[in-house]
């Protein structure tokens, strides 16, 4: 098989996975611009009161610890974000525990799509890793096709 044929066949195999990687990457870059991907952060004025402990936030929301994926404090913005395993994000006043916003956070889903992990190990390593390796070969064969040919 010559280089041109290899380049053409490989481009067909990598076309769809690469398209998914590119589109999801662009959407992830713009996630702060779209509320439906990543909820915007709500700032509140802080006073001298201490921040609530994570357990107090959990009790205030009446949640089970098993439902929680992550709690993020942003003291300068007086904000605590509780991210649930269901994909929901609850933003609270970090001092009073008042709920400021509840919204679905789709960033993790987009990251899973971008990495191929949404398809499990087969997708991540069998499709996306091979696509990456294929792109390296496409790069090299493309360079080879661009180089001027010597006449015999």
Image: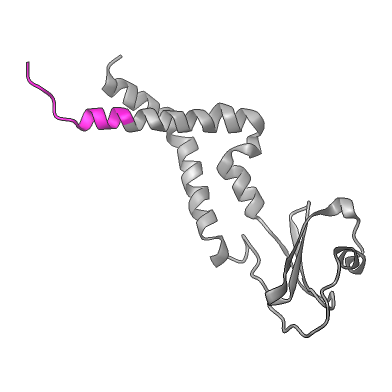
- The structure residue drawn at horizontal position 52% and vertical position 31%, both measured from the top left corner, is 129
Q: Quadrant of residue 107?
A: bottom right
Q: How many marks?
A: 0
Task: Give x and y (percent) for residue 118.
Answer: 65, 39
- The structure residue drawn at horizontal position 60% and vertical position 31%, both measured from the top left corner, is 123
- The structure residue drawn at horizontal position 59% and vertical position 33%, both measured from the top left corner, is 124
Which of the two residues, 40 or 103, is positioned nearer the viewer here?
A: 40
Which of the two residues, 54 or 33, is positioned nearer the viewer here?
A: 54
Task: Give x and y (percent) for residue 149.
Answer: 13, 25
Say above or below: 105 vs 44: above
Say above or below: 40 vs 7: below
Taking the magenta stretch, the answer to whether it contains residue 150 is yes
Q: Quadrant of residue 102?
A: bottom right
**Image-based side of 120 in relation to 4, left or right:** right
Quadrant housing the C terminus: top left
**Image-based side of 21 in relation to 106, left or right:** left
**Image-based side of 96 in relation to 109, left or right:** right
Quadrant housing the N terminus: top left
Taking the magenta stretch, the answer to whether it contains residue 109 is no
Task: Give x and y (percent) for residue 144.
Answer: 24, 28
Q: Which residues are magenta?
A: 140-152
Task: Give x and y (percent) for residue 140.
Answer: 32, 29
Q: How is the image coloured?
A: one colour
The answer to whether any part of residue 11 appears in the image is no
- The structure residue drawn at horizontal position 33% and vertical position 21%, both measured from the top left corner, is 6
């Amino acid at each position: 098989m010559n280089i041109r044929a290899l380049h053409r066949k490989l481009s067909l195999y990598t076309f769809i996975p690469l398209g998914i990687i590119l589109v999801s990457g662009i959407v992830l870059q713009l996630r702060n611009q779209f509320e439906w991907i990543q909820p915007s952060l709500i700032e509140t004025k802080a006073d001298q009161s201490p921040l609530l402990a994570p357990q107090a936030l959990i009790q205030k929301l009446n949640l089970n610890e098993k439902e929680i994926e992550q709690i993020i404090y942003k003291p300068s913005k007086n904000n605590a974000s509780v991210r649930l395993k269901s994909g929901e994000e609850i933003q609270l006043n970090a001092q009073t525990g008042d709920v400021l916003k509840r919204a679905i956070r789709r960033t993790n889903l987009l990251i899973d799509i971008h990495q191929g992990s949404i398809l499990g190990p087969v997708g991540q390593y069998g499709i996306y890793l091979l696509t990456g390796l294929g792109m390296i070969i496409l790069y090299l064969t493309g360079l080879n096709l661009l180089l001027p040919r010597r006449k015999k």
